[in-house]
Image (cartoon, grey):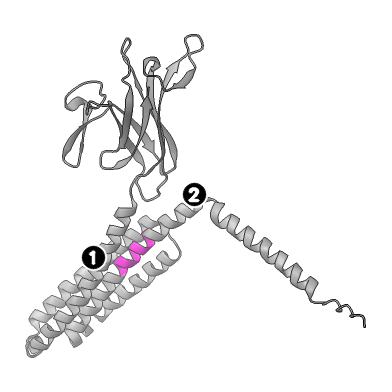
Amino acid sequence: MKEHDSPPNPLRKWVILLSVLLFVFVATTMYFGFFGKPSFNQEFIKTAVKNEYLQGELNSLLVEHELIKQEYGTLTEQLSEKDSVILANAAEIKKLIETNADYKKIKRQLERLQNIAKEYVENIDQLYTENKTLKEENKQIKDNLEEQKKEVETVKNEKKELSRTISAAAVHQAYNINSRAIYFKNKSGDEVITEKANRVDQLKTTFILGANPLIPSGPVTIYCRIAVPGTGRVLTPGSGDAFAFDFNDEKLQYTAKKTVNYNNNAETVVIAWNLVEGDKAVKGLYLVQIYTDDQFLGETSFELK
């Protein structure tokens, strides 16, 4: 007896169509997520970190203000008008942070609010001194204050941790460090990479100084140290502090240095060392290290035969 063919499933073509559309959507999302406008992402990260810092400052102020009110109880009712001013200003600053307003504007308003809060504390202290009826509540106030101080300390520690996180992220990084020996053709002057020590005219080091929106823009001095094989010494244009830099409380001789105007974008840096006329390079393995005034960026090596 013949087997009958299964009837075609009418949902099969819709499943296939939906699978194709889903694949296109995921691929498009991943492309724009990974390759879409890195500069925009950096600015977004920078703004988010600043706003988090400002929000932390505001939260700390409000916690301390609330603790003062709890500590002095009914006495604070005499300063209800100033309390309203503080809360209104805090609400306005919070709105500015949420809408990504100008950082300097928010910072000025936050400093003004801190001054108002300071005046509030001074006023409440004066009222407390003048109001003798509060003496009976002193012991209870002191007990509560210890608990409240712990809360304030917790907030302060969180602020310190945020500050440490920002500092740890605000460092330079170097990528693709590469050093090579070259000689120049007599007629054309073109550069030719060589591994032969007797042909070397110049030692050249290149690398990419990475982008980091958390580092302030401005000049950055970069030092290159090239160690001579088998000698333990560094190639240097001269001896003494004139050709050295301070790093971790130590004087380090450098081979060559270069100052770049860092503007938070990735850029290629080239540092070259020209051999003195008549001098010859030494055969062996050369170790090359890259530093700034306060960071070790990395190292590489090359060999001459």
Question: Can residue 140 be seen?
Answer: yes
Q: On the rendered image, what quadrant is the C terminus found in? A: top left
Q: Amino acid at mark 1?
A: Asn
Q: Residue at horizontal 12%, vertical 88%?
A: 140
Residue 279 lies, in percent from the top left, at 31, 13
Label 2 neighbour load within 10 Å: few <14, some 14-19, many 20+: few
Circle 2 — which element?
Answer: helix
Residue 225 lies, in percent from the top left, at 28, 31
Q: Which residues are magenta?
A: 50-58
Query: In this rendering, is residue 121 above or below 212?
Result: below
Query: In this rendering, is residue 86 above or below 257?
Result: below
Q: Residue at horizontal 67%, vertical 63%?
A: 23
Question: Can residue 208 be seen?
Answer: no
Q: Quadrant of residue 127?
A: bottom left
Would residue 130 appear left or right of 205 to someone viewing this image? left
Would residue 38 appear left or right of 19 to someone viewing this image? left
Looking at the image, how many numbered discs can be counted on the residues? 2
Q: Pick whichever of labels 2 and 1 is earlier in the sequence.
A: 2
- Residue beneath label 2, please? 39
